[in-house]
Amino acid sequence: MSTLTTRVVLIGSTGLMSTDRGADMLRGLTTITYLADDVAAARDWYAEVLGTEAYFARDAGGTLAYAEFRLGDYQHELGLMDRRFAPPQPDHAGGAVAYWAVDDARAAHARLLELGAAPYEEPVERGPGFVTAAVVDPFGNVLGVMENAHYDDVLSALRR
């Protein structure tokens, strides 16, 4: 059985990740990886959702085992990996939902449902400038979307 290895390297403005200050330990999002039994189908579905093609792909054993998209303001990576290569899951794993920034969480949620995702979390206003929603993609992954005023503020400050 072949193995698939994905390596992510983080390089900050200093060239190294500082561990001296707790605030710098998690520097930002690099890659979110979703699992699929059929990576080619997942790649095609996400290409439709995102309006762009995957920029990277890797085969293993003659089938597509990994595909990756770069998206958004920071070119974050969304990877789609063959479920065969997933690490073992802990017995008591906590639930985590990664929320992708969108301009309109309600519209994004509706579009994902139209494209075949299943409902998971209807749009919820969490406070002024913060709305979350989530779906389950056709491959069993939770995909969160969020209007986030903080994200918008940070992006605006970086563009000055």
Image (cartoon, helix red, strand yellow):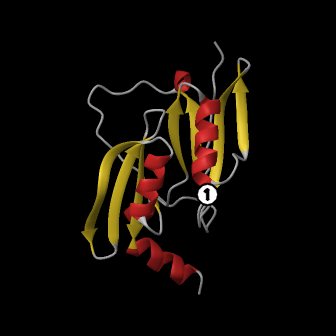
For badge 1, the amino acid type reads Leu
Q: In this picture, is 118 found above or below 108?
A: above
Rendered location of residue 76, percent (x, y): 58, 56
Q: Quadrant of the N terminus?
A: top right
Q: Is residue 21 above or below residue 9?
A: below
**Is the residue marked by circle 1 packed among few (<14), some (14-19), or many (20+) residues within 10 Å?**
some
Instruction: Decide if residue 116 is on the left or right side of residue 78.
Output: left
Q: In what quadrant of the picture does the C terminus appear? A: bottom right
Q: Quadrant of residue 106?
A: bottom left
The quadrant in which residue 123 appears is: bottom left
Q: In the picture, residue 41 is in which quadrant?
A: top right
* Residue 79 against residue 160 in the figure, above or below: above
Res. 95 in view: yes
Percent position of residue 120, x then y: 32, 44
Q: Which residue is depicted at the point 63% across and 27% down?
A: 4
Q: Residue furthest bottom?
A: 160
Q: Residue at x 50, y 27 (%)?
A: 86
Question: Measuring 27% from the left and 66% from the top, which residue is drawn there?
Answer: 125
On the image, numbered disc 1 is attached to which residue?
71
Tag 1, which secondary structure?
strand
36 over 13 or under it: above or below = above
- Which residue is at 48% across, 32% downward? 139
Question: Viewer-proximal residue, 16 or 53?
Answer: 53
Q: Is residue 21 visible?
A: no
Rendering coords of residue 150 (x, y %): 40, 74
Q: Residue furthest top?
A: 1
